[in-house]
Amino acid sequence: MNKPIIRFDNFSIENPDSDRPLIAPLNLTLPPYRTLALVGESGSGKTLLGRSILGLLPEQLNTTGNIYFQDKKIISVTGNPTVDNKQKKNEIAALEIRGKAVSFIMQNAINAFDPLFSLQDQFCETLQKHTALSYRQALIKAQQSVSKVKLSSALLKRLPSQLSGGQLQRMMLALTFALEPELVIADEPTSALDSLTQFELLPLFKQMAKERSMIFITHDLALVQELADDIAVLKRGEIVEFRAKSILFSHPQHPYTQYLLAMRAKLNQPFARLVRKKQ
Ligand SMILES: Nc1ncnc2c1ncn2[C@@H]1O[C@H](COP(=O)(O)OP(=O)(O)OP(=O)(O)O)[C@@H](O)[C@H]1O
């Protein structure tokens, strides 16, 4: 049987300055090759949860419990200073999986690239860091993946600031396709883009979701409808409902899920109409 891609084992996140945990102790197992949509109101903890898998949490926050990637422990923090070395080892484990095994697509792709170097240099450097490819082989792979996202490979010669937000997000997708990670964590990757660009990127996200495991953080239930296999609903740091999409949409159990569905359905009507019209 396939190993779970991610397993949270009694994992929680706390801010020492606050008496309420930012993520309450969480036990959740994610099977591979599925897309999990993480939804919930602003501040419910979606980004923290996504970043915790990558070892990218702000330093001032404390965690307890464990996170496993394919049964390999990547986070284990007990808050006990005597386990500092163990903690360091696990941070290294998180670093090792970041990039190659797990890729992160953030909201503003401009923040993912170094403004001083051409996209070509950044693609090749990243690919060479995570694979055994030569510069030339990395360049060919970069060009192939850029054409896969329907951009001209001539754009690779440019600096990030010389591309539009939509083009840069395509570049981010191209880099992710080229790295062939096992898990993609996408944190509101389309919310900074206009509806038409969002719509144009949808097939690429669908293709990515089909090929690998994905955690998709979003407020947009129309996107969830298109992409997700499963949905976890977060409220104030707690998962109040976790179900297959078809069941959650047709029979939401928790009052908060019912509220979210009712409200978001209204807000997402324009995008949903655009998707229907094109199909
Ligand atoms: N560095 C930090 N220090 C203290 N609290 C933080 C820090 N980063 C995030 N938080 C708090 O953690 C909670 C969850 O934040 P998070 O960014 O995960 O929310 P979110 O669900 O992704 O929200 P949004 O949808 O608005 O992006 C919020 O209450 C936020 O204020």
Image (spheres, rainbow, N blue to C red):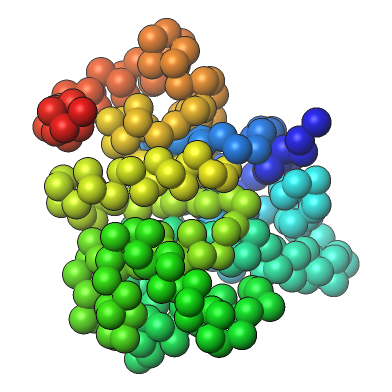
Q: Residue at x 21, y 81 (%)?
A: 162
- Could you tell me residue 126's position as x and y percent? 54, 78
Q: Residue at x 44, y 31 (%)?
A: 228
Q: Check the image and report above or below for 65 versus 222.
A: below
On the rendered structure, is 131 left or right of 190? right
Q: Check the image and report above or below for 180 versus 238.
A: below
Please state the total of marks drawn on the protein image: 0
Viewer-closest of 1 and 45? 1
- Could you tell me residue 146's position as x and y percent? 37, 67
Quarter of the picture holding the C terminus: top left
On the rendered structure, is 83 left or right of 31? right
Viewer-closest of 111 and 198? 198
Q: Farthest residue toward the top?
A: 251
Quarter of the picture holding the N terminus: top right
Q: Check the image and report above or below for 6 versus 184.
A: above
Q: Residue at x 68, y 78 (%)?
A: 132
Q: Quadrant of residue 118?
A: bottom left
Does the rendering let one see residue 203? yes
Does the rendering let one see residue 43? no
- Could you tell me residue 144's position as x and y percent? 43, 68
Q: Residue at x 51, y 35 (%)?
A: 36
On the rendered structure, is 176 left or right of 222? right
- Could you tell me residue 160's position as x and y percent? 29, 80
